[in-house]
Amino acid sequence: MNTMKLLLVIAVASVASAFRLSQQDEFHFKSWMAEHSKVYNMNEYYERLQIFTDNKKRIDKHNEGNHSFTMALNPFSDMTFREFQRAFLWSEPQNCSATNGNYRSTNGPHPDSIDWRKKGNYVTEVKNQGGCGSCWTFSTTGCLESVIAIAKGKLVPLSEQQLVDCAQDFNNHGCNGGLPSQAFEYIMYNKGLMTEQDYPYTAFDGKCVYKPDLAAAFVREVMNITAYDEMGMVDAVATNNPVSFAFEVTSDFMHYDRGVYASTKCHDTTDKVNHAVLAVGYGQENSVPYWIVKNSWGPSWGMDGYFLIQRGKNMCGLAACSSFPVV
């Protein structure tokens, strides 16, 4: 079969596959495309239509069941989870090693709930890491921004790109992953982090162009909470500030919408975590305790860029490696 005939067979097969989808499937897809300003060529269109329809069916099935959280279409609904992993999560899980942390808990008493977003101008807007596995840098800057704002009364967005480009000597890997604790170490020994304005984000690995004279944030000490000590995390968030942590994202989290996330698919060990985020508070809903967490996938994902995740059970390894800086 010559090349022209082969291409024709492939095109016909693609169209035939698309016709097996209902007109309603295509209507939902076109509405979603318009909402998220998506444009495809002909081959891409039918491929993404199929993936979108599969994702929508999975979402609808989940929402028909009895779960503590709901799922919804979002900007990632034309992607398979494998594609999503490659774009937004670490290519290799980072093994957290803070088995014996240096944070000393006060042992309470702790308030029943706390939300640092409501205590003052202490948390920056939700940012978007784009197609780069740099979540660890956003967890790092988010935490340091809040710590400085609480200590000094000034909230300034800090540079994720400096961490992407410059923190490799501390076992970080730019768009391929890293850990907030190691990023805090870099800032401490590097003697500074620039602002987002002075060292803007590109979502790509680049050459380090750090300028010490423009350093705007400094770290005096790094506090690592002992692995799996989730009450230590509660104490730190209740008595100090938001806390960075890592956990394992599995496929059902990709389309999280609202409610308290819980999973039976994820692991709870230090070697499986693949995404870093920021705990800005905690609370309880229908007798289920949860963390309030700031993500870095933009405000159109989840609850305006935030999510709730079950607290007290090391859900998806969230207590495996948590940390914050002292300024």
Image (cartoon, rainbow, N blue to C red):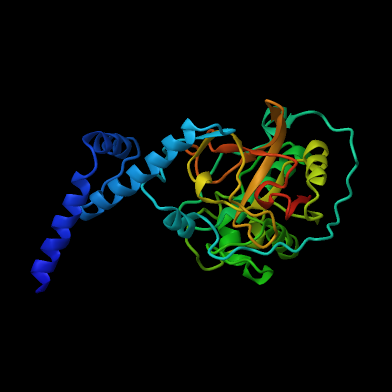
Who's the residue at 24% across and 50% down the image?
A: 46
Q: Nearer the viewer, residue 200 or 61?
A: 61
Residue 217: % across, % down: 70, 51
Please tell me whether residue 254 is drawn above or below residue 25 in the rendered image.
below
Residue 6 in view of the camera:
yes
* Residue at point 91%, 42% (across, down): 106
List x then y, in percent, for residue 228.
78, 52
In the rendered image, which quarter is residue 34 located in? top left
Pick whichever, 117 or 268, lies toward us: 268
* Quarter of image, res 271: bottom right
Is residue 131 at least partly visible in the picture?
A: no
Q: Is residue 247 above or below residue 86?
A: above
Q: Give coordinates of residue 254: x percent, y percent.
A: 49, 46
Left or right: 171 in relation to 239: left
Which residue is found at the position 83% from the left and 41% from the top?
235
Q: Is residue 325 above or below residue 262?
A: below
Tell me how many marks there are: 0
Looking at the rendered image, the quarter that the N terminus falls into is bottom left
Q: Nearer the viewer, residue 185 or 89?
A: 89
Image location (x, y in percent) of residue 86:
46, 60
Q: Is residue 204 left or right of residue 167?
A: left
Q: Residue furthest top?
A: 286
Q: Residue furthest front?
A: 65
In this rendering, position of residue 82 left or right of residue 327: left
Query: Is residue 147 toward the left or the right of residue 20 in the image?
Result: right
| Depth check, front residue: 269 or 165 | 269
